[in-house]
Image (cartoon, grey):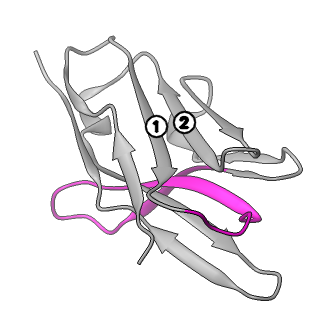
Amino acid sequence: QVQLVESGGGLVQPGGSLRLSCAPSGSILRPNMMGWFRRAPGMERELVATITTTGIENYAESVKGRFTITSDTAKNTVSLQMNSLRPEDTAVYYCKFRRWVVPATEYWGQGTQVTVSS
């Protein structure tokens, strides 16, 4: 069973930067959308950023101007550059791949912890 594997989480001080990466553990059909979601303690999982294979990006208002999503469609990988991190960015970050053309598929990663604290 193919899984998504995230890397790059950790502890960073407010104002610092981290880069998250996500790649499948095996071969998959090209997804139509790759993205990042997060769940803070006691909160619902929320969208952070997504990118389609045509390059259309979408960001949560709270991260616009600070986070940048990029993808490599040839390798089916996605990254999230996070700058100017704030304590409220603390969460478990999950990557998600979704394919809506037949055969439709959806994959989630196991999550990587990002903690912003001094």
Which part of the image, by quadrant, shows the C terminus? Answer: top left
Residue 60 image position (x, y, % from top left): 57, 47
The number of discs equals: 2
Cα separation, mark 1 vs mark 2, equals: 4 Å
Determine the secondary structure under disc 2: strand
Along the viewing direction, whichever of 25 and 80 lies nearer the viewer: 25
Q: Residue at x 46, y 37 (%)?
A: 21
Mark 2 is on which residue type?
A: Ser
Q: Residue at x 47, y 45 (%)?
A: 22
Residue 90 image position (x, y, % from top left): 24, 39
Quick check: is 54 in the magenta stretch? Answer: no
Along the viewing direction, whichever of 99 and 1 lies nearer the viewer: 1
Say which residue label 1 marks: 21
Residue 35 image position (x, y, % from top left): 58, 54
- The residue lying furthest to the front in this view is 27
Mark 2 Cα within 10 Å, few/some/many (few <14, many 20+)? many
Mark 1 is on which residue type?
A: Ser
- The residue lying furthest to the bottom in this view is 103
- Range shown magenta: 27-50
The answer to whether residue 69 is above or below residue 116 is below
Q: Residue at x 65, y 50 (%)?
A: 76
Along the viewing direction, whichever of 26 and 42 lies nearer the viewer: 26
Quick check: is 45 in the magenta stretch? Answer: yes
The answer to whether residue 32 is above or below residue 77 is below
Say which residue label 2 marks: 79
Which part of the image, by quadrant, shows the N terminus? Answer: bottom left
Q: Are marks 1 and 2 in contact (CB under 8 Å)?
A: yes
Quadrant in the rendering for residue 43: bottom left
Q: Which mark is residue 63?
A: none
The answer to which of marks 1 and 2 sits earlier in the sequence is 1
Quadrant in the rendering for residue 57: top right
